[in-house]
Image: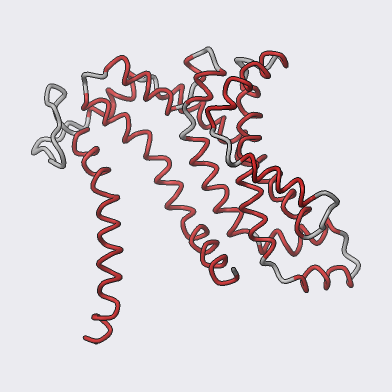
Amino acid sequence: MGRQFRTKGPRYALLGGIALYSVIPVLSMFSAALMPQNVIPEGLNFPLHPQWHNFVAAWSLANMTTLLKSSVLLVLGVVPIAVLVSTLAAYAIVVLDIPLGRLFYFVLLLTLALPFEIVVIPLYFQDQSMGLLNSRWGLILPLIGLNMPFAVFWMRSYFVNMPPELHEAGSVDGASSLQMFRRIHLPLAQPAIASLALLMFLSTWNQFLLPLVLMANPNEWTLAGALQTFQNKYGTNEVLLCAGAVELMAPTILVYLVLQRHFVKALIQGAVKG
């Protein structure tokens, strides 16, 4: 027992230190949100009389009900379509080995090197020329396109590690490419798809710059954009600002807790097979 502790003890200590380093800022923000509004928060310090009504005040002042609906519609419009298209694209590139598939994948990888800020202004004028500016689809379609390079890269890394015998067995049984995708590859790819959906949810939910540029109506911005507006209006009230930040983080934490099992499973499969 002592030998096992000496061997694994430093690992647990390192993991515990990393976890503590990650959790302390969140706890500090949460404790600041419970302070009285006329107090300047200082580090991790939970008050004796927590002011829970600060969360209600922050939610109301930042108009978060309307912006929550906007963020949910954006996530529902981007994540399912992007996950489906990227999964089909990776399947076609790796398993079906379509013509010019490797060239297409190489071009996608090149776009990963482009800073996000470079494409914002071109997207604005493109939306304007297509009549999509200040519309929901004018924001959903660019976000789907911007997520494609990483999404295809993620799913391709999974299909590359799939045993080719599965596809060959399906071909011998007379199954079409679509049937093999639905009955063989798609069920086995559920951990990778779930983890990709989690990453794309986080990316879309935390989207800040693009809604501010492409949507003129503040009621159609995301919660991340609302936090910026909240900071501009009530920047001196750090307590309400922290309360709004906690409310913004809560859905992402909840979604991660629900999907973390699939995320870890996908990473372990990639590590073992890679």
Q: Quadrant of the N terminus?
A: bottom left
Quadrant of the rendered image containing residue 231: top left
Q: Is residue 177 left or right of residue 211?
A: right
| Image x and y of residue 194, in percent | 57, 53
Residue 39 horizontal side relative to residue 180, left or right: left
Q: Quadrant of residue 237?
A: top left
State the scheme by which the image is colored: secondary structure
The x, y position of residue 72, in whole percent, is: 52, 32
The residue lying at 24 percent from left, 39 percent from top is 30
**Which residue is at 87% across, 64% downward?**
175
The number of numbered discs placed on residues in the rendered structure image is 0
- Quadrant location of residue 168? bottom right
Q: Nearer the viewer, residue 214 or 258?
A: 214
Q: Give whichever of 236, 157 is nearer the camera.
A: 157
Q: Describe residue 130's horizontal placement relative to residue 174 as left or right.
A: left
Q: Is residue 109 above or below residue 40?
A: below
Which quadrant is the C terminus positioned in? bottom right
Residue at horizontal 21 percent and vertical 18 percent from the top: 236
Query: Picture coordinates of residue 47 (x, y %)?
Result: 11, 37
Residue farthest to the right, as pictured: 174
